[in-house]
Structures are given as structure tokens and as C-alpha cells.
């Protein structure tokens, strides 16, 4: 039966890949390139980022490279000039190759595989995530007696949410609607609905196959449910996941991307609201200009990160349980305030989202493309935002104080609910209600969201300042907690590779992680972001294989838990 199921599931995934491969369309644009998107959208951390999105300079290099290229062209034909030119050509070629690989990794095959996996798990588990959402909310705040683990279920959830709720909730949603039309928001919700089933399975398997040491420290996640659930012959797949997770965490997803999101948001606010002429005092470094706002913000954030991550999981969880609920509630309240101020437009906006999901051309003059584009942008951004299927959240779920895998699986799935169905929806509605997504405005990325909040809060005095200020604060909180969450994820991946007893290696990694955060604002070479995004996407493939092959195990654990709950063997 298990072999028959695995064959069917594999065939379904193969069909998705084959359907995409047979379609005569160009290589998909990178869905995971959130880092370049955040930087180009939120403002410049260096002169290179002021280039128009899609231009050669914005895509392939920094202003430092542009300066080098100009010098090479003007200089005599010497050996030094030739060396510089060759170096620049090599870097551009390598960057283009990385961008192409990144585009394929985050293309339709991965998006389709994650969505198909969610649909399969939803059917196999009989909509357990929908029928038990209320119970899951209850489990969030109740700690199981005598449960083994490191942190409470709520602490584990907040640790996962700290990495999940990030710049994608602001920039990603705006990009999806800006390129796919309002209908992209509908497909984002569809992805989240099935993604909840995926997150449930991930959390359940993480607790089922985790390891708890004599000192109470927990190590779990996809690498362990691959190795222990599928057998030792699959250890190579677990190692691949751990390698991908380690590289993705330190090379950009948790460091460079996020710190640049914070510093560029701060710099943009000062340019718009403090220095009206945009001339923020600064300095030149490596041929690029940086404001003192960027330098000071980067230093402050680096110190804060060091104080938290060096303390390990318990300190990360303790900070996350305070910061994550605060920032999420704060953001939702402001969004709700905006929507209440434009209440007469909300019903029409909801109608537009649903209708545009199936006929986007009718509502955007053909600019946003076909229904396929709306689906692709919405589903892709939903997946990238809530990370369902990527295998990151179960690393945090494994540390929860519980003896019941299903219980933590239910708590884990609420992460997708809060991230996409609540926060992303609020952002999307604010954009649609205010019309900030309209193509004729010519806005991209976070500029769409800034326009939405400036226009939506226009009934308040100084709304042109309040909107950018609010988004700067939100971006700073979201990105800061993402730095903390991804430190834990990548650290656990490294710990699996080197062994849990080699604490000195882990401590060195933490210090290196903080160092990368510190220098992150000054790293403008896009190849770094491309590599990080690629490895982040590659994490999904080993995880999806395990989820499909272990789906019968998840189903069995689910049925057994609710049977015991029904006869009173365990407390609800």
C-alpha cells in the first residue's frame, strides 16, 4: 500500500514537472529573489541599488563594479585593465548563470510540487487543518504537562513565525498584486489553505522523529524525519537538506537580505521625511556612497542580534514570544484602521479580488497578463511568505514541550494562517482598496505599499509621513525577527552535519552569522542573493520527498490521536 501510494504521489509530481517542461515558455523569473526585490524596492543601500529594476546594473552588479567597468573602458590597454575587464566579465557571467538557476529552482516545477503536495495531504488527512483550527488556537496557549522539549508550544510557534513573517508580507504581496493583478491575492489564499495541511504534516513529523539529548536539548526537523522515517539509506537526502539550510541561512535569507531591508527602509524614511532634498549625510566606501543612517542602523541591529543569538534557542524564543505577537498585532491594527477608514470600498475590493482571479485582463487593461500569471504570482508569493513545504518551520516545531506529535502539528499549521491568511490579506486589501496597484501609477515593490498606506490613511494629519514611518517600523521588526529565526534554523542544520556535541563550531557559526549581518548593508553584489535564494528553494525538494513518502505515517498518527482523544485517554 505504501509503495502504491508513493508511486501515485511521485507520478503526480512528475506530471507537474512534465507539464511545465512541455510548455514552450521562457525560463521563469526568479520567485525566490526576494533580496534583490527588497533592496531595489525599499531604497538604495548603495548607489547600485538606485538603478531601475531589470537594468543590467541593477541585476548584475554594484556601483563599485560599474565604476571598475568605466575605468577599464577609459584606461589604456594594459595588463591590469585586461585583468579587471576579465574579472568583471567573469562576475557578470557567473551572476547571470546563478540568476538563471535561481529562476528554474523557484519556477513552476517547485511551486507546482509544493501545491500538489498540499492538495494530496489535505485529501489524505481529510481537511484536518480546517476542522481543527479552533482546537489549534487553544493548543497555542496551553503547555502540555510533562511534555519533553526546550520551549513551550507558543514559543516554538513564535520562533517559526519570527522567520516566516518578514519583508515578503509587505514587499512580496505588493509585487504579486502589482504584476499579477488583484486576483493574485485570491490565489495566495488558495496556496495558504493547502499550505496549512503541509505545515501540519511537517510539525507532526518533526516531533515524531526528533531526538532529545540527556541535557534536554532537542534536535529535529526534516533531516531527522528523512533519516529516521525513511531509513538510513536516505541519510544522503537529509544531509543535502542540512547543507542547503546552512548555506541559505548565513548567505542571505537570514542575514544580508534582512539587514538591507532594515537599513534601506530607515534610509528611505529619512530621505522622504527628514531630509526633504534627499541629501542624507554619508560617506564613500569601496566606490559606493552610504548614508550615516545606514551605518548606524546596521551597527545597532548587529549588536541586538548578537545579544540574542549568542544566547541560543531559549533566548531567541523568549524574544520572539514578545516581539512577534507585538509586531503582528501592531501591523494588523494599523491595517484594520486603514480599512475601517475606507469601509465603503472594502466590499468592492473583495469582489474585485475574486473576479480578477479568473479574468485579470478585464480589470487591468491586459497589463497584468493571463489567469496563469495571476495564479503563478499569487501562489508563488504565498509559498515564499509562509514557507509551507520548504522545511524550515518544523526545525522550530521539534523543540516544543510536548509528547504528542499531532498536537504540535496543529499548532505549527497556525503559522501559515497568521502569516498569509491574516497578515498578507490585510496588506493585499489595503493595496486593492486604495488602488495603489494600478499599472498606470508605475509603482513597484514596497512603493506600492507606501502609496497604499499614505493614501489609505489620508484622513489622518501628516499621512505622507505616517505611512512611510509605519512601514519602516514594520519592516524593521519583521526583518529583525527573521534574522533571529533563520539563525536558529541554519544553526540546527549545521549541528546535524557536525554533531550536537561540537558546541564550539556552533558558537563560531553564531559569531560569523553576526559578522555577516554587520557587513550585510555594504554587500551589493547580487550573486550573493541569488546563491542564497537558490539554496533556500533547494531545501524544499528533500522535504517534499519525505512528506509524500511519510504521508501514510502522518495519517496514522492523526487517526490515533483523535481516537485517543475521543475515548478520553488524553486530555484536549
Image (cartoon, helix red, strand yellow):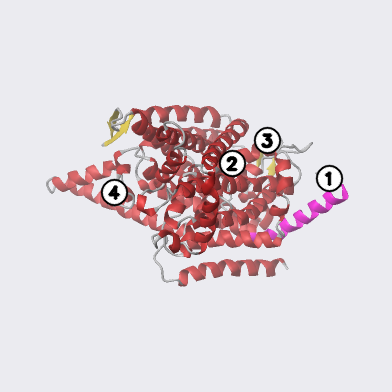
Q: From mark 3 to mark 4, how far is it between C-alphas?
A: 46 Å
Q: From mark 4 to mark 1, how far is it between C-alphas?
A: 61 Å
Q: Residue furthest front?
A: 344
Q: Earlier in the sequence, mark 3 or mark 1?
A: 3
Numbered range of the magenta stretch: 548-570
Tag 3 secondary structure: loop
Is residue 125 visible in this depiction of the protein? yes
Crowd rating for badge 3 (residues with CA inside 10 Å; few <14, some 14–19, many 20+): many
Looking at the rendered image, the quarter that the N terminus falls into is bottom right
Q: From mark 2 to mark 3, how far is it between C-alphas?
A: 14 Å
Determine if the magenta segment contains residue 562. Answer: yes
Q: Which residue is mark 4?
A: 57
What residue do we see at 55% from left, 70% from top? 15
| Circles 4 and 2 in contact, beta carbons < 8 Å | no
State which mark lies toward you, 3 or 1: 1
Q: From mark 2 to mark 1, how far is it between C-alphas?
A: 28 Å
Determine if the magenta segment contains residue 498. Answer: no
Q: Which residue is mark 3?
A: 151
Q: Earlier in the sequence, mark 2 or mark 3?
A: 3
Comparing 205 with 491, the one in front is: 205
Is residue 32 visible in this depiction of the protein? no
**Quarter of the image holding residue 327?**
top right
What residue do we see at 69% from left, 50% from top? 204
Tag 2 secondary structure: helix
Amino acid at each position: 500500500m505504501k509503495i502504491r501510494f508513493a508511486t501515485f504521489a511521485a507520478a503526480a509530481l512528475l506530471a507537474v514537472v512534465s507539464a511545465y517542461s512541455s510548455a514552450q515558455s521562457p525560463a521563469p523569473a526568479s520567485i525566490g529573489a526576494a533580496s534583490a526585490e527588497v533592496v531595489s524596492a525599499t531604497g538604495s543601500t548603495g548607489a547600485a541599488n538606485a538603478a531601475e529594476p531589470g537594468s543590467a546594473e541593477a541585476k548584475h552588479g554594484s556601483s563599485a563594479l560599474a565604476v571598475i567597468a568605466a575605468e577599464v573602458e577609459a584606461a589604456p590597454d594594459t595588463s591590469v585593465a585586461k585583468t579587471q575587464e576579465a574579472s568583471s566579465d567573469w562576475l557578470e557571467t557567473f551572476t547571470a548563470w546563478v540568476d538563471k538557476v535561481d529562476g528554474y529552482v523557484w519556477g513552476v516545477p517547485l511551486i507546482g510540487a509544493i501545491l500538489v503536495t498540499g492538495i494530496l495531504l489535505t485529501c489524505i488527512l481529510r481537511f484536518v487543518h480546517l476542522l481543527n483550527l479552533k482546537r489549534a488556537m487553544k493548543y497555542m496557549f496551553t503547555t502540555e504537562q510533562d511534555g519533553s522539549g526546550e520551549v513551550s508550544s507558543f514559543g516554538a510557534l513564535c520562533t517559526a513565525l519570527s522567520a516566516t513573517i518578514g519583508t515578503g508580507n509587505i514587499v512580496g504581496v505588493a509585487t504579486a498584486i502589482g504584476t499579477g493583478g488583484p486576483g493574485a491575492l485570491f490565489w495566495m489564499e488558495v496556496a495558504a489553505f493547502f499550505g496549512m495541511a503541509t505545515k501540519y504534516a511537517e510539525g507532526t513529523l518533526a516531533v515524531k522523529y526528533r531526538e532529545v539529548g540527556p541535557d534536554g536539548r532537542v534536535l529535529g526537523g526534516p533531516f531527522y524525519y528523512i533519516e529516521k522515517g525513511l531509513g538510513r539509506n536516505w541519510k544522503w537526502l537529509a544531509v543535502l537538506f542540512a547543507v542547503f539550510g546552512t548555506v541559505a541561512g548565513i548567505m542571505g535569507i537570514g542575514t544580508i537580505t534582512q539587514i538591507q531591508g532594515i537599513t534601506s527602509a530607515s534610509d528611505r524614511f529619512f530621505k522622504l521625511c527628514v531630509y526633504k532634498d534627499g541629501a542624507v549625510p554619508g560617506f564613500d566606501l569601496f566606490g559606493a556612497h552610504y548614508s550615516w543612517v545606514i551605518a548606524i542602523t546596521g551597527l545597532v541591529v548587529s549588536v541586538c542580534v548578537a545579544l540574542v543569538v549568542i544566547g541560543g534557542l531559549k533566548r531567541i524564543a523568549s524574544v520572539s514570544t514578545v516581539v512577534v505577537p507585538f509586531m503582528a498585532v501592531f501591523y494588523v491594527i494599523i491595517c484594520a484602521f486603514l480599512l475601517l477608514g475606507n469601509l465603503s470600498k472594502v466590499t468592492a475590493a473583495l469582489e474585485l479580488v475574486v473576479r480578477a482571479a479568473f479574468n485579470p485582463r478585464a480589470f487591468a487593461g491586459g497589463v497584468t497578463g493571463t489567469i496563469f500569471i495571476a495564479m503563478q504570482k499569487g501562489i508563488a508569493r504565498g509559498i515564499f511568505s509562509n514557507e509551507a513545504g520548504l522545511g524550515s518551520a518544523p526545525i522550530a516545531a521539534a523543540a516544543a514541550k510536548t509528547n504528542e506529535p499531532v498536537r504540535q502539528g496543529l499548532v505549527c499549521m497556525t503559522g501559515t494562517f497568521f502569516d498569509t491568511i491574516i497578515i498578507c490579506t490585510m496588506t493585499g486589501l489595503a493595496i486593492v482598496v486604495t488602488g495603489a496597484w494600478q499599472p498606470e501609477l508605475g509603482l513597484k515593490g514596497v512603493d506600492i505599499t507606501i502609496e497604499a498606506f499614505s493614501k489609505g490613511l489620508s484622513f489622518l494629519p501628516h499621512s505622507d509621513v505616517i505611512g512611510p514611518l509605519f512601514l519602516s517600523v514594520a519592516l524593521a521588526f519583521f526583518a529583525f525577527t527573521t534574522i533571529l529565526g533563520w539563525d536558529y534554523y541554519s544553526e540546527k542544520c549545521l549541528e546535524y552535519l557536525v554533531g550536537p556535541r561540537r558546541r564550539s563550531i556552533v558558537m563560531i557559526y553564531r559569531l560569523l552569522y553576526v559578522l555577516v549581518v554587520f557587513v550585510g548593508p555594504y554587500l551589493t553584489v547580487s550573486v550573493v542573493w541569488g546563491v542564497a535564494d537558490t539554496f533556500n528553494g533547494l531545501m524544499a525538494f528533500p522535504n517534499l520527498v519525505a512528506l509524500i513518502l511519510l504521508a501514510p505515517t502522518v495519517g496514522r498518527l492523526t487517526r490515533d490521536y483523535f481516537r485517543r482523544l475521543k475515548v478520553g485517554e488524553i486530555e484536549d
